[in-house]
């Protein structure tokens, strides 16, 4: 049973991890709680669903197109909504409220186009099982775990070893200073938006295959990803990555010890506890003097 | 600036125009016209439950197609409202139907939705009929419940499990009043009789989508059967993950698979369901609407029959008298789900049946 708990933690944590990393990445250059990131994840899932079930695309090309569309949506939102507002001097609170409005529009559009009912990509394809030495894990869950690990490794390398990555870290440290030394912050935010959009689109698609989708899925996903990132520590990518697993383990432990209905209670108790006692998360970023 | 002012004026004019059109004075009904009985039907017309709303609408249209001309008492008007399967919307919709549309009768679907409307109906002295399982929905003079006969369903399930030599079951139940009412009856029965015993009860929230660990717990507990009391959309996620987990413990339920979107996930599984529509009703429904009906369309037909029986029999629009007439005269009536009983609490019920999923379709056991 403990093995089952660990497997479930790995699966759920990987899903949360993708969202947490995208959220952390976006927050590092555009520090406000951008709720439209949840909508981008939902768009990835629904576009895949539409391409496969209505237009008859094969899953691979549908996923690629849906990812591209998610990236495009994330870019468009940044270019046409948040950048102009930021240029007008809007505060983080105003941007948060704007993102809530944009999220609501997207959720309503998904509702209108696809209906409110529960849909699943699982019946379309990717429903095979992989034999691991201790258990049989559905293929989609293996893909979720592997892609989460690969994206974490790739992003960590990108942020540490590339010029662009270093620029992103510089903006994260001080947007004002990086602007003064001549960096094009807006261009960086655009690039990060597309990157975050791709990760979120992938997360949405994988969740769509695994547990299904509904118009409100984006908000639920983003919320758990945000909690994971805050628990782990907003200062680092590895914090977001590990915080997601910590959250998934605590949730599943709650389900194991108490009952399924306690899942969200456990998540939010941990969230509040961290906000109260350790607001900078488990992996607090050390500030050098 | 000037453009903004012009745009604001145009929008304001449009809003005022729309408001006038909505509330414009209608021509008075001629004196010799029959009094109008307005029936507000609150159903999910979009989203997870849209299939039920569509079937209900087709049923109501079918029922009143010829009835209004034949009626000696009243003219019946049906108003459909969409609750999107969200209980929170039901109260606002019911208030709108009572206060703005001035309906005489409200019809709701599922216990949680009926429970929201029940006190409002009682307070406003509006007749309320709910297709539900929780007896609390029928409390008060004006509330009726076209029940799926919870006691009968639980007894049928209990007897069938005993016949299959089942000794212990685990229950997976969503936190909602209808399923809880089923569990309460089952617990009473299990305490009273020798036979099936309830092992662990696993409560889940309505929006739960991840059942993997719960299935692991059930596997560890190793009951003879899993009784699933979930509704849309959790039931689809549960059955998918049940199939993936390859647990050999069979699943059954009460009304459960009726709510399953992808019925192939429960292929070959049996469950207890509320009284099925009669072959005559099914034939008539298919002939007039061109499609197969859902179970509850039969229940809606029964409700509309009860309403019209009440108004036609009492020969008045006084709701007190109509309620009394239904209570005293609808017992043993032949309806779309066969003969029904009406108890003093206003619960109207029929005989539950065993059903099975064959080739992704629901069939009555023994007729497959």
Image: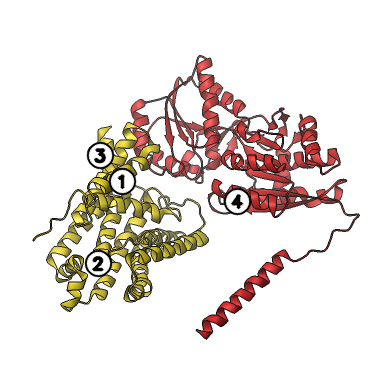
Chain colours: A yellow, B red
| Disc 4 from disc 3: Cα separation | 44 Å
| Disc 2 from disc 3: Cα separation | 34 Å
Circle 1 is placed at which residue position?
A: A272
| Drawn side of residue A25 relative to residue B192, left or right | left
The quarter of the displayed image where residue B208 is located: top left
Of the image marks 2 and 1, the number of the one nearer the N terminus = 2
| Disc 4 from disc 2: Cα separation | 43 Å
Identity of the residue furthest to the bottom in this view: B2
Point 41% across, 53% down: residue: A217
Subunit that carries the residue with mark 4: B
Circle 3 is placed at which residue position?
A: A6
Under tag 2, what secondary structure? helix
Circle 4 is placed at which residue position?
A: B92
User: What is the quadrant of the C terminus of chain B in the image?
Assistant: top right
Point 28% across, 72% down: residue: A190
**Quick one: label 2, few (<14), some, or many (20+) residues within 10 Å?**
many
């Amino acid at each position: 049973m403990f093995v089952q708990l660990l497997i479930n933690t790995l699966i759920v944590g990987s899903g949360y991890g993708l969202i947490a990393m995208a959220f952390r990445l976006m927050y590092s250059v555009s520090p406000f709680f951008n709720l439209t990131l949840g909508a981008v994840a939902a768009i990835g899932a629904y576009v895949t669903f539409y391409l496969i079930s209505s237009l008859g695309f094969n899953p691979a090309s549908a996923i690629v197109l849906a990812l591209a569309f998610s990236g495009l949506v994330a870019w468009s939102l940044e270019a046409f909504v948040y950048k102009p507002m930021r240029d007008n001097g809007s505060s983080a609170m105003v941007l948060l409220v704007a993102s809530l409005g944009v999220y609501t529009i997207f959720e309503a559009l998904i509702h209108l186009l696809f209906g409110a009912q529960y849909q699943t990509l699982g019946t379309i394809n990717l429903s095979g099982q992989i034999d691991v030495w201790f258990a049989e894990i559905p293929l989609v869950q293996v893909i979720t775990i592997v892609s989460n690990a690969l994206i974490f490794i790739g992003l960590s390398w990108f942020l540490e070893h590339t010029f662009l990555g270093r620029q992103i870290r510089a903006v994260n440290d001080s947007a004002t200073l990086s602007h003064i030394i001549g960096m094009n912050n807006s261009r960086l935010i655009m690039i990060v938006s597309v990157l975050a959009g791709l990760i979120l689109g992938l997360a949405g698609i994988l969740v769509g295959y695994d547990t299904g989708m509904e118009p409100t899925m984006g908000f639920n996903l983003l919320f758990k990803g945000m909690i994971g990132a805050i628990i782990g520590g907003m200062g680092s990518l590895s914090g977001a990555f590990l915080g997601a697993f910590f959250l998934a383990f605590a949730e599943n432990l709650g389900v194991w010890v108490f009952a399924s209905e306690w899942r969200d209670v456990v998540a939010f108790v941990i969230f509040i506890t961290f906000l109260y006692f350790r607001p900078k998360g488990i992996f607090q970023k050390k500030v050098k003097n | 600036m000037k453009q903004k002012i012009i745009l604001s004026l145009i929008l304001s004019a449009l809003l005022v125009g729309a408001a006038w059109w909505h509330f414009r004075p209608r021509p008075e009904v001629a004196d010799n016209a029959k009094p109008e009985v307005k029936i507000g039907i609150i159903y999910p017309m979009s989203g997870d439950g849209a299939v039920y709303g569509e079937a209900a609408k087709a049923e109501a249209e079918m029922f009143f197609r010829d009835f209004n001309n034949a009626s000696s008492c009243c003219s019946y008007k049906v108003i459909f409202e969409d609750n999107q399967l969200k209980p929170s919307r039901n109260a606002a919709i019911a208030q709108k139907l009572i206060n703005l549309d001035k309906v005489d009768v409200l019809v709701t679907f599922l216990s949680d939705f009926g429970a929201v409307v029940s006190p409002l109906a009682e307070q406003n002295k509006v007749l309320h009929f709910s297709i539900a399982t929780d007896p609390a929905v029928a409390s008060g003079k004006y509330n009726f419940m076209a029940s799926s006969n919870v006691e009968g369903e639980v007894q049928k399930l209990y007897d069938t499990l005993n016949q299959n030599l089942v000794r212990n079951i685990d229950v997976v139940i969503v936190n909602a009043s209808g399923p809880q009412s089923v569990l309460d009856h089952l617990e009473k029965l299990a305490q009273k009789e020798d036979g099936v015993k309830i092992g662990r009860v696993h409560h889940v929230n309505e929006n739960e989508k991840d059942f993997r660990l719960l299935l692991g717990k059930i596997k560890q507990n190793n009951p003879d059967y899993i009784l699933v009391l979930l509704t849309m959309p959790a039931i689809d996620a549960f059955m998918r993950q049940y199939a993936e987990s390859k647990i050999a413990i069979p699943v059954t339920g009460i009304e459960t698979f009726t709510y399953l979107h992808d019925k192939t996930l429960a292929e070959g599984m049996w469950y207890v369901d509320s009284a099925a529509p009669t072959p005559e009703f099914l034939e008539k429904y298919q002939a007039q609407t061109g499609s197969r009906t859902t179970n509850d369309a039969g229940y809606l037909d029964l409700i509309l029959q009860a309403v019209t029986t009440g108004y036609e029999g009492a020969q008045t629009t006084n709701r007190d008298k109509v309620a009394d007439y239904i209570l005293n005269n609808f017992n043993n009536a032949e309806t779309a789900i066969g003969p029904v009983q009406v108890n003093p609490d206003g619960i109207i019920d029929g005989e539950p049946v065993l059903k099975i999923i064959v080739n992704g379709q629901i069939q009555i056991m023994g007729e497959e």
